[in-house]
Image (cartoon, grey):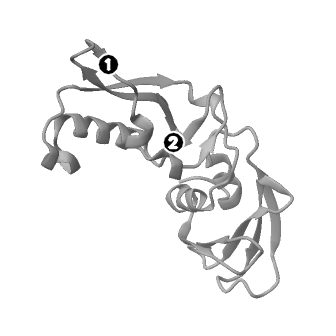
Amino acid sequence: MTILIDNSKAVEISIREWDEENTQYGLDWSADFYDVGRLKTVDGPELAYIVEDVDYCIEQANDMVAGVGDFAEYGPQPDTFVDVTELDRSAYLICEIDLYQLSSEIYNHGLNVKDTEIISGMCPEDTIKVVFMDGTACCVGIDPNFHLCVNFSYYADESCRDGELSTSCHDFEGELDYLDGVKDICGGLR
């Protein structure tokens, strides 16, 4: 079994093939199907893998069994079974800030956000540059001393060269998603 989580959902999924000779299902190979070695993890009751969209991952497994979509060329796999059990998402907290995911959440949910981009070389770590509709900007970076905290500074224009207007921070420790941080950074949600 493999545990997959996204911002709103956690599931335990297994993919097994029926072994006709032994009249039972074989070993679970969901970890191979999802190539979990390339995914970031969080600790919870059990190790979980972070994905962008749990429902999409489930759909891909079901498409593989049905032999449709990306798996049409392989045809149906009637001896393969996908088992999905929904888990308590609150058991899996953010343990590492993903700047790309945070940037996406700021762009999609931040109040008055015009654009976001990841900029390298501004700070020791990559930085998210947020441009607001009124032309002001904000730079967001992970605090080098507290890896679950982001520091952000506001500037009068999107060049971010003139002096800072103000600075603040947000601590993600114990949070399930990025929305409270987005609210702090952007002054609200859409």
Above or below: residue 55 compared with residue 170? above
Number of numbered callouts drawn: 2
Tag 1: amino acid:
Tyr
The picture places residue 150, in percent across and down from the top left corner, at 76, 59
Q: Residues within 10 Å of mark 2 (few under 14, many from 20)?
A: some
- The one nearer the camera, 147 or 49, is 49
Q: Nearer the viewer, residue 82 or 17?
A: 17
| Residue 33, visible in the rendered structure | yes
User: Callout 2, which amino acid?
Assistant: Asp
Q: Determine whether the residue tagged by mark 1 lies in a helix, strand or loop.
A: strand
Return the residue at label 1. Answer: 25
Give x and y (percent) for residue 169: 80, 58
Q: Which of 62 and 107 is in front in this view?
A: 62
Tag shown at residue 6: 2
Q: Where is residue 168 in the image (x, y as percent from the top left)?
A: 81, 62
Instruction: Tell me which corner region of the image, top left, top right, bottom left or bottom right, holds residue 162.
Output: bottom right
In which quarter of the view is residue 20 placed?
top left
Name the residue located 61 percent from the left edge and 34 percent from the top edge. Answer: 47
